[in-house]
């Protein structure tokens, strides 16, 4: 009898946990679905977390007499292999007292969505957030992505086949069950996407370890023709965010790798947002450290030059490294 009484809490836990999982959108053991906290960034979650943790970075590159600023949070976003996490770490070091993290209304890599602003706490002031977008030059970005296709398992090749990676349709095979879920307008898909806007809609136990997030074109709801279209659409999306995000700043990761660019960062942050940052650093090893891939074949450079939308790229400060005169052959 005594043993039964002590076992009651455990029995209740075993019953309630599966029930909670099964009733959450996108997860539940009944369908083999798993929770995805790493790619579901909820504003309420990071606001609460940052308020509790503050700026927890131990390494700081300077000591500042920090004056009050309207901005309390810095959120870094950008595509995979652009140096998002590295930039967040760097900004924490040069912004003593500022709460810096990755992701905004969605996770750090994905299309953000203005309609998700309603998920912030009611008393939250959006003017207290600075959104920083990180871009990387197309040559290094495409090649790094081809070598490690994060959240794009259908594009992984061994040995690496960059031509196949950049030319293959930006989608993956979808299970029959996931198609049913995606076709239901009431479905809640992974990474806070609505039904039909991401493949797969929901991750399964079988996909754990090589999870995929294939975003659809926000304008059409269809898969991108290739990763070039994904990049261009994402860049245009970043440019449009300035219309609904009060405090918005774009940086090229290549600039953040230069110690001599630190004064320029300080100037931008202070003049535009009233944020004081380090104006110089003594340890150049503490700048954004993102690995540069060597021995990229010349044929790859030519292919990228001929398939990138340079009209959009130039708005981010990038230009062709090779001549576009011979692009007809590609």
Image (tube, grey):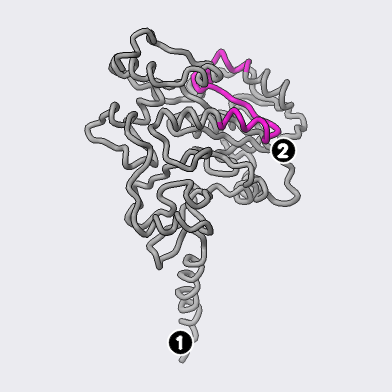
**Left or right of 28 on screen, residue 206:** left
139 shown above or below 111: above
Q: Secondary structure at mark 1?
A: helix
Residue identified by numbered label 1:
4
Helix, strand or loop for disc 2: helix
Q: Write the residue at 35% across / 51% down.
A: 174
How many neighbours does mark 1 have within 10 angstroms: few (below 14), some (14-19), or many (20 or more)?
few
On screen, residue 99 above or below 272: below
Q: Along the polypeptide, which appears first: circle 1 or circle 2?
A: 1
Query: Would you identify the image quadrant in which residue 77 lies?
Result: top right
Q: What distance separates the C-alpha of mark 1 from that of mark 2?
A: 53 Å
Depth check, front residue: 198 or 272: 198
Which label lies toward us, 1 or 2?
A: 2
- Residue drawn 72% across the image and 38% down it: 128
Left or right for 249, reference 287: right
Task: Where is residue 53? Give x, y as percent.
Answer: 62, 45
User: Do we see residue 146 in this rendering?
Assistant: yes
Residue 239 in the magenta stretch? The answer is yes
Q: Residue furthest bottom?
A: 1
- The disc placed on residue 128 is 2
Magenta residues (range):
237-264
Q: Quick check: can you spot residue 283? A: no
Percent x, y for residue 69? 75, 32
Structural crowding at the residue carrying mark 2, measured as other residues with C-alpha within 10 Å and reported as few (<14), some (14–19) or many (≥20):
some
């Amino acid at each position: 009898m005594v043993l039964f009484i002590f076992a009651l809490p455990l029995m209740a836990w075993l019953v309630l946990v599966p029930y909670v999982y099964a009733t959450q959108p996108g997860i539940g053991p009944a369908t083999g679905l798993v929770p995805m906290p790493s790619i579901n960034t909820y504003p309420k979650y990071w606001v609460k977390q940052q308020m509790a943790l503050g700026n927890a970075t131990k390494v700081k590159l300077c000591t500042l007499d920090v004056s009050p600023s309207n901005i309390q949070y810095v959120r870094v976003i950008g595509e995979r292999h652009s140096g998002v996490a590295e930039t967040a770490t760097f900004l924490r070091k040069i912004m003593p007292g500022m709460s810096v993290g990755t992701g905004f209304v969605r996770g750090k890599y994905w299309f953000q969505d203005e309609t998700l602003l309603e998920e912030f706490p009611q008393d939250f002031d959006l003017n207290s957030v600075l959104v920083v977008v990180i871009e990387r030059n197309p040559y290094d970005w495409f090649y790094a992505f081809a070598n490690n296709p994060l959240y794009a398992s259908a594009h992984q090749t061994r040995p690496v086949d960059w031509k196949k990676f950049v030319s293959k349709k930006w989608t993956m095979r979808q299970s029959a069950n996931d198609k049913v879920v995606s076709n239901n307008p009431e479905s809640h898909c992974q990474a806070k996407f609505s039904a039909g806007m991401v493949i797969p809609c929901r991750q399964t136990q079988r996909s754990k370890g090589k999870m995929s997030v294939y975003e659809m074109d926000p304008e059409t709801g269809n898969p991108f023709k290739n990763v070039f279209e994904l990049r261009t659409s994402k860049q245009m999306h970043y440019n449009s965010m300035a219309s609904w995000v009060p405090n918005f700043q774009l940086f090229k990761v290549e600039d953040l790798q230069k110690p001599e660019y630190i004064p320029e960062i300080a100037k931008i942050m202070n003049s535009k947002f009233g944020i004081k940052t380090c104006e110089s650093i003594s340890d150049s090893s503490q700048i954004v450290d993102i690995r540069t891939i060597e021995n990229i074949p010349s044929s790859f450079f030519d292919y990228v030059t001929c398939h990138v939308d340079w009209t959009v790229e130039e708005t981010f400060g990038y230009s062709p490294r090779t001549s576009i005169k011979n692009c007809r052959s590609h």
